[in-house]
Structure formats: structure tokens, C-alpha cells
Image (cartoon, grey):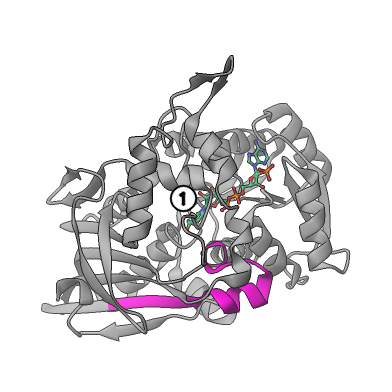
Amino acid sequence: MIIGAGGVGTVVAHKVARLPEVFTDIMLASRTKAKCDAIAEKVGGNRIQTAEVDADNVPELTKLLESFNPDIVINVALPYQDLHIMDACLNAGVNYLDTANYEPIDEAKFEYSWQWAYQDRFKKAGLTAILGCGFDPGVTGIYTAYAKKHYFDEMHYLDIVDCNAGDHGKYFATNFNPEINIREITQNGRYFENGKWIETKPLEIHKPIDYPNIGPRESYVLYHEELESLTKNFPSLKRARFWMTFGQQYITALEVLQEVGLTSIKPIKYQGMDIVPLQFLKAVLPDPGSLGQNYQGETSIGCQIRGVKDGKEQTYYVWNNCSHEEAYKDTGAQGVSYTTGVPAMIGAKMFLEGKWGGTGVFNVEEFDPDPFMEDLNKYGLPWNEEVNKLLPVEK
Ligand code: NDP
């Protein structure tokens, strides 16, 4: 069962429907049933059943899960729903996968503690929960696990680099849910060094990084959730940073929106009603799902790692470039939804095929990366690698 009929849900639905030998019966459930029906119709072939559900209503979702009885839920609704969906999965005895860690709606704070706290309950129930199986988090964790397995005895420096060099022709739009995206960018930056977290002002550290097939783009250090699990699961890391590109126009527009208070998540009174400025802003910004048609250019996301193998210094860079046009041709969605939805499908496939499993709550880097890496090449996100070349982030 897929929960969430947005940009990412569109990609997941298309991709799972094409693999009837793995995904025999599919339901797409979301807050607005009409959106599920529209996606199911595009997919065609009566492959997808649809349902309306408020995933924050645990009894309602439990009932739906009990009636459809899926093997696994692919949660591509919003991070606010994560804990409610995990609760319903525990009630109904269903395995769980998501692409973004839980965030409380009234506080822009994302960390794994809330979901890691479900460890014992999933263990006791004999169920698997797979956290953060999009691209970043997701493929970036699998790339790191693959690097460790095949190229390093010890990894010391990890830089995750995320470039979107696409152009959707809009003055200002976010590539995934605007509320989640703006909360992520406007908070303080943070990276890990020598066992400590170093906090920065929002977008304080930046420099141009050269991306394959794209060229140099100004890249900014942000806090990103996989840093928390990767530094825990690979304790030899001395430093771990996450870089993301932004154009100057995007940053200027965001600064204005911030200065006038439109990115705030504190409710204000408007004509006698309580409204959250950021939720209002989301309502007037372009729907990320609608950006696909005219989106040109590509994304490039990868991991650049320095460490030691057989007593010698070694570097490793692994990345994927994804074309927005190709993503749109394949699923009717743009590249950012595509790079998230394809890994979510593959993660569920790994579970259903018995290649990933175990009871409890897992981050993706805890599983065997090899079969997942093979499937990335098969299902639309082929990767490239370079060994012992100067890392672009170190130039
Ligand atoms: P969208 O806003 O396009 O879609 C979210 C969907 O969830 C909408 O259809 C929405 O319903 C539905 N939804 C919201 N609340 C509820 C609820 N209470 N019950 C049921 N359905 C609900 O977001 P995206 O598709 O862009 O993103 C989906 C997820 O993917 C997000 O969690 C995002 O953080 C994550 N993501 C992860 C990335 C990664 O690389 N790991 C990258 C990009 C995104 P409605 O249509 O009615 O609004």
C-alpha cells in the first residue's frame, strides 16, 4: 500500500505497477481520493486500487490496512504522518518503509530519535521498518554502505553533494513539498566533525563544487537527516557534511519571503482565523508535481569519500545524474520526485524478495547494498564511480 498521492507517490505508483511479479496487488491511499484516482488512471490496466484516508487518524488507517492487508506500506505522505503510520502498521501487523524522517508539525526539527524509539515495538511484533529510503536520505546511505563494503577498511571523510541543475521556468518553486523544503533550508546548518556537531547560520558555508556533466555550481552546507544515522552506523567517520546547490534567484526570493514572515510556522490571526504563514505560502506556490512538463536539465547527487584501504589513503566518488525530461517521460513527474520514488520502490522490492529484512527499525545503510545497487541500474537511476581521483569537494 502506497500512502500519499503527491509527486513522489506518482512515481512509486508507476514503478511498482510495472512489476506485477513482485507487487501483485497495489493500493494507493491518500487524503484526497481524486488525486489517487487520477494517478491510477494514468498507470492504467486496473493495476491500482484507491482509497481515501487521513493517515493522521490511526484507527481509520488501521482499519484500511486490516481490510487490504498489505505486506508493506510505502509511506510517501509527509514527515508529519510517519509516527501515526508506524502506529497503524503495528496495530495491523504490516511492515513499513518511508523516505523522510519524522518532524513535529509545530517545530522545524528533524531527527531519528522519535522513529528509533519504535525499535522494540517493531522487534516484538516481528515487523520490519525501513527508514529513509528515497535518494537523500536513501541512496546516499546505500552508496556509503557500498563504499565501505568494497572500497574501504575505514572511511574518514564523507561529503554528500546534491545538485539540481534543472530549470522549470518558474520564478520561485520548490522541487518537493514547499513546507518541508523551506523548513529544511531556513534552519541552521550543521555538520559532524571529530565526534561533535558544528552548527552554522543558515546557508553560511558555501563554495562552488564541480558536478559531472553540469560544471561548477555554488553549493551550501545544510543539515540533512542521513548525517545522523551515517555517523552512528559508520563510527570511523571524522567528518560528514551535506552540500546542496541553490541559484542566487532562489536564495534572494527565499530571503524576502523570510524577512516578511511568510516562512514562519507560528500561527497568526488572519480575519479571525488562525493561519500558519508557511502553509499559506505553500497554497500559493506552484505544486511541485506540476513542474515536470517543462523541466529541463538534470540533477546530480553523490557521495565523495576519503579513507583508508590496505593501509593506503583512498578516495571514492559515486553518483547518479538524472534528467528531468527522462523522468517525466517515464512517469509524468520531475527528477526530484523520480529520484525519491524509484528508491522507495526498490526498497520495498528488496523487502518483498527477502533480500532485506529482519525485525526492528533500520536505516538503509544497515542492509546489504549490492542487490539495491544492481536495481538502481535496472530501474532508472544508473550510477557512476571514480576511484582515487581528486574529489571535486576537495578542489
Ligand atoms: P507532496 O506534497 O507532493 O505529496 C504529499 C502527499 O501526501 C499528498 O498527496 C497529500 O495529500 C498526502 N498527505 C498529506 N497529509 C496526509 C494525511 N494526513 N493523510 C493522507 N495523506 C496525506 O509531497 P512529495 O510527493 O513531494 O513528497 C513526499 C514525501 O517524500 C515527503 O515526506 C518528502 O519529505 C519526501 N521526500 C524525500 C526525498 C528523499 O530524497 N529522501 C526527496 C523529496 C521528498 P493531498 O494531495 O490531499 O495534499
Q: Whole-percent x and y of residue 181?
A: 45, 48
Hey, what amino acid is under mark 1?
Phe
Q: Where is mark 1, residue-wise?
A: 362
Q: Whole-percent x and y of residue 182?
A: 42, 45
Q: Whole-percent x and y of residue 327?
A: 59, 74
**Residue appearing at x 54%, y 65% in the figure:** 343
**Residue appearing at x 54%, y 42% in the figure:** 282
Residue lying farthest to the top in this orientation: 272
- The segment highlighted magenta reads 317-339
Name the foreground residue: 363 vs 304. Answer: 304
- One can see residue 286 in this view: yes
Name the foreground residue: 341 vs 268. Answer: 268
- One can see residue 153 in this view: no
Q: Could you tell me how many numbered marks the image carries? A: 1
Q: Is 234 inside the magenta-drawn segment?
A: no
Q: Decide: is 113 above or below 15.
A: above
Per the image, label 1 sits on a secondary structure element best described as strand
Q: Whole-percent x and y of residue 4?
A: 66, 48
In the image, is the residue at mark 1 within 8 Å of ligand 1 by its beta carbon?
no
Q: Is 318 inside the magenta-drawn segment?
A: yes
Residue lying farthest to the right in this orientation: 46
Name the foreground residue: 259 vs 1. Answer: 259
**Residue appearing at x 23%, y 57% in the figure:** 240
Which quadrant is home to the C terminus?
A: bottom left
Name the foreground residue: 125 vs 160. Answer: 160
Viewed as shown, does residue 33 lie left or right of 171?
A: right
